[in-house]
Amino acid sequence: MMHKGLKGVVATETRISHIDGEKGQLIYRGYDAKVLAGKCTFEEVAYLLWYGHLPDKDELLWLNEELRKNRFLSEEMKTIITLLPRSMDVMSVLRTAISAESGYGEYHFPPTISQAIKLTAIIPTIIAFRKRALEGVEDVSPRSDLAHVENYLYMLTGEVPQYAHAKALESYMILTLEHGMNASTFSARVTASTESDIVSAVTSAIGTMKGPLHGGAPSGVIELLDDISSAKNAEKVIREKLTRGEKLMGFGHRVYKTHDPRAVALKTKIKELGGQDDWLDLAMEVENIAITLLEKFKPGRALYTNVEFYAAAIMKAIDLEPELFTPTFTASRVVGWTAHILEQAEDNTIYRPESRYVGEIF
Ligand code: ACO
């Protein structure tokens, strides 16, 4: 029996997260991700995913310190990033820079939590360094007194972010830290299953994350909303897209057959953020019209907004440029990838599915 796209195939057991696609529930190590996003920091939830329990005060201080001291890029890394062609998109820069990082640290198999922390710590710095280099402005060194997400926004702009902006982005990042056997996590686990190193596994995952059907969706959401531009055009534009057989970015999910709980949590968060009401109103109207039309064009497929729809809204509200959406998603998902790489190494079997030959035999 063939399972195209491995739909419905259970390829491993995991203790890291659980998704109930019917109930619309996402669990990280036993805790509801929505609840965690409402009361924990990025660092606390990262600790939970790596270690399997929430940190006590000393454990959290330790992780904060580790992340802070590992944020800095070496001069060699800065040179590598600067030499990459200007036309290279940020995800490709990230993939190349992370790959180069293996030359500047100890990343041999088996993977360790220290290696995971290092990769998590430098990804925001690489993104910010590249963005500022392209703009022709001086890079902003990480600040050790700022938390992980706050420092990321600070390195992008050179200004300490508004509290509400940092908190909104932190909620998004917590809600996207981990999501079971999604395409990029699967890539990471496949690479790790060959006993390759953690940098290679994360590099595979970044390449997978980049695609528009996975992490590349948020900028597609902005394009969709820009195309629509006003609620009065929504029905016509969406109908035309669906008639042409196009997919609506930010809708549909392999696992959720009801509302994506991350989209629901982010929608609430963005209402708290305020200040972008016209844009948010448009997003909500488009959501309603699109769901109705999707049910007409694709009856019974249960297509609702996914996390990327409201992620785009959050990132637009805090003035992140669309080209930073997928890299920012990567800056959070690296925690889930590395937790899975560690888990894979603990009880490894190499991934090696089969294919059915449908060509000729001469
Ligand atoms: N717009 C229009 N039709 C859709 C959409 C959509 N967004 N999503 C699914 N469909 C349709 C498919 O065309 C298919 O129709 P068919 O049965 O007539 O062939 C049916 O619904 C089932 O969809 P599949 O593509 O088979 O579902 P699958 O589980 O393979 O794909 C995916 C899930 C890739 C997320 C898909 O819904 C999609 O492409 N969405 C748009 C891109 C997107 O938003 N990606 C972000 C996902 S979240 C994340 O990765 C973090």
Image (tube, grey):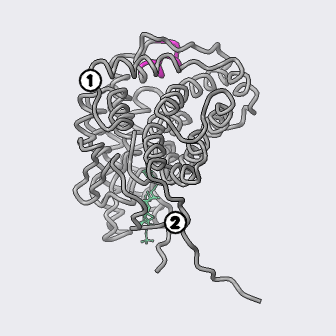
Residue 268 lies within the magenta run: no
Q: Is residue 68 above or below residue 300?
A: above
Disc 1 element: loop
Q: Quadrant of ligand 1?
A: bottom left
Q: Where does the magenta region start and end?
A: 150-159
Is residue 8 shown left or right of residue 21?
right
Circle 2 sits on which residue? Answer: 244
Q: Is mark 1 within 8 Å of ligand 1?
A: no
Q: Amino acid at mark 1?
A: Asp
Q: Amino acid at mark 2?
A: Arg
**Distance from the alpha carbon under mark 2 to that under mark 1:** 54 Å
Q: Is residue 124 above or below residue 332?
A: above
Q: Which residue sits at x=57%, y=51%?
A: 191
Q: Position of residue 272 (x, y in %)?
A: 26, 28
Q: Which residue sits at x=49%, y=33%?
A: 116
Q: Position of residue 88 (x, y in %)?
A: 69, 37
Q: Position of residue 21 (x, y in %)?
A: 29, 58
Circle 1 sits on which residue? Answer: 56
Q: Nearer the viewer, residue 253 or 236?
A: 253
Of callouts 2 and 1, the N-terminal one: 1
Is residue 274 shown left or right of residue 106?
left
**Mark whose residue sits in front, 2 or 1:** 1
Q: Which residue sits at x=43%, y=22%?
A: 148
Q: Main secondary structure of the magenta part?
A: helix
